[in-house]
Amino acid sequence: MAELARVEGLVHRFPDGGLGLDGAELRVDEGDFLILAGRNGSGKSLLARHLIGLARPSAGKVLCLGRPVAADPLAARRAIGLVFQDADAQIVGQTLLEDAAFGPANLGLPRAEIEARAREALALVGLGGLETRRPDSLSGGERRRLAIAGVLALRPACVLLDEPFANLDLPAIRSVLAVVTALHSGGRTIVVVTHELEKVLAHATRLAVMDSGRVVYDGPPGGLERGRYEELGLMDPFRSGAGLKELTWLR
């Protein structure tokens, strides 16, 4: 598979001297469904921000499509669309259609293409037919899906989701997970940043786990040794004895 993004020896030092990333290494390939996991403070969300140039490395390299992200962060953001944990931070329109159209409008596209992209994106996340609804009338899961639509309207090669299941109830988790898995099945590269492995591990092609600013495991979704989950601040998704594919929440 072709390489989409690569992180090499990435160091992020905070102004107080603390290390957020300490030589992190990671590769994202086209077609991946990659989970980037780790305890709070492990560096996973910070690394995600580096992938699209929202943070500046203290040392090391971040490449997207073979080019340094620092040299052209806008190109990285066109290739990798980030869905923030707080969906409301990405919702800016007065209607669902207006919100989904915001990104394409900023690209200066023709009006007809802007609307077509917005409608297509809403349909992809199961919000088609609700174009005139106000975002504040939506449930938490629907708002999360609207935030995904706003990213999809920009047609990125990769969708990067930061804690997409946070603060959602079971039906909302399933609705978001169904969208994410359908996008991957349709050919989109997916990266999910989460500490809630049990919700999504069954659908991943790779698992990368971070600890203390480094990637300490990168391999098959079910390949981490059982005792390592707790050591790394994660709940063991296999604690019930279920197999990998039995973990799916899409039932």
Image (cartoon, grey):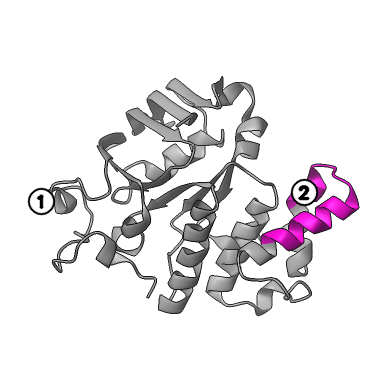
Q: Is residue 98 above or below residue 211?
A: below
Residues 119 and 36: in front is 119
Residue ID at (43%, 57%): 163
The stretch of residues the image draws in magenta is 103-121
Where residue 6 appears, x then y in whole percent? 44, 28
| Labelled disc at residue 73 | none
Q: What residue would you read off at disc 2?
A: 104
- Report if residue 145 lies within the magenta region: no
- Amino acid under disc 2: Pro
Which picture quadrant has residue 238?
A: bottom left
Question: What is the CA distance from the residue labelled 2 to the residue labelled 1?
Answer: 46 Å
Where residue 224 appears, x then y in whole percent? 18, 46
Where residue 171 appears, x then y in whole percent? 45, 78
Which picture quadrant has residue 28?
A: top left
Q: Is residue 129 above or below residue 236?
A: below
| Labelled disc at residue 227 | 1
- Amino acid under disc 1: Gly
Where residue 208 appears, x then y in whole percent? 31, 42
